[in-house]
Amino acid sequence: MVGSARRISAIVADTSPIDERADAVLGELAEIVAYDAAQIAVWNPKTSAHRTVASRGYTAEMRAALNGPHYQTDRVWSVLEQREEPVFWKDCPFDRRESAFYVETVEAHGFREGATMLLRAIDGAYLGMLLLNLEVATPPADDVRDILGIVGAGMAPLVDRLAPARQFVSLHSPQLPAAALDRDHGWVPLTPEGLPAPALLDSITEALSRADRPARFRWCDPDGDRRGRRSRPHPLTVELFPFSGSTCRAVVTWRREPLPYGLTRRELDVLAALATGASNAVIAQALSTSVRTVTTHVEHILAKLAVPTRTAAALLADREGLLGVDERYVI
């Protein structure tokens, strides 16, 4: 068993096509546990469906049932989501016949005992599953189950088109939100934060068409709005990493860029108006706020810039380039 587990690790790490590696893994898996049928399936979040990567022993009808929505809506699925190891039907905290999927699919196709293991990325994202239906009616011994769990945990690259991208992010920028540009499926989030603003993705895609090496830039969405009012959003520092792999074109990370002198976005708006010589009343009208609020903003601006007067603030802002801060953040 140990030898088979090592060979499976070597197969997964190989560079041959994924479907060939997955089929070879299923062949080695038979040396660990005797099964009637087995399958490795990949999850596509855009279509909310599974696709078979490699399969042995299942009919086309059974594969369709395993890959379809019926399995994920069955009560057994919540049990699978809570476990990191392979889950056999005997492990379920309910009678297996209370599962419609077991009765209507598994048992109906002549299978009895079997296991499913959900395959996840480093960040916990669901990638696909390993399924087995055994030759016998009882689960294997604990040592076999332990080996299956170890082997299954290493199968993620077989169901993850973006495995190299995830590994890169985990090493280079583990604390930052990240996304990858899949050559077939477009932008895919690599971290729980999801994708950044569509306008930023458009800018990145345009930049990628002009660059073949890593790039770093500051970006601010000029069309961003908040609470129904036009307002300049917080700028971001973006890092772009082109990839040469067959499935991934690029990886991008982003983080909020600190504004100069600790000024807020609204304070920059007030400073820009103040520098034109506008009074607090005029600024309040232009920004659709109260004079009292503008007065408070001006007090904060003078304190943060460490200057005594509005004129001094305007001169410093001009000298430090604070009045054109937005333009410095646009790609």
Image (cartoon, rainbow, N blue to C red):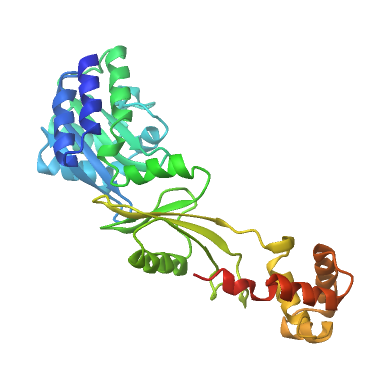
Outermost residue toward the right in this view: 308
> On the picture, is 1 further left or further right than 297?
left
> On the picture, is 1 further left or further right than 125?
left
Q: Residue at x 81, y 73 (%)?
A: 313
> On the picture, is 171 further left or further right than 144?
right
Please state the horizontal and vertical placement of residue 25, each as a whole percent of the image.
18, 29
Q: Is residue 136 above or below residue 109?
A: above
> On the picture, is 226 further left or further right than 252?
right
Can residue 73 be seen in the rendering of this structure? no
Q: Residue at x 40, y 30 (%)?
A: 83
Q: Quadrant of residue 123?
A: top left
Q: How many marks?
A: 0
Please state the horizontal and vertical placement of residue 271, each as a whole percent of the image.
75, 75
Please state the horizontal and vertical placement of residue 122, each as a whole percent of the image.
41, 37
Q: Quadrant of residue 113?
A: top left
Q: Quadrant of residue 21?
A: top left
Closer to the camera in the image, 189 or 167: 167
Closer to the camera in the image, 58 or 268: 268
Instruction: Locate the N terminus by quadrant.
Output: top left
Q: Residue at x 29, y 38 (%)?
A: 157
Closer to the camera in the image, 112 or 299: 299
Can residue 68 be seen in the rendering of this structure? yes
Q: Is residue 217 above or below residue 150?
A: below
Please state the horizontal and vertical placement of residue 31, each as a whole percent of the image.
16, 18
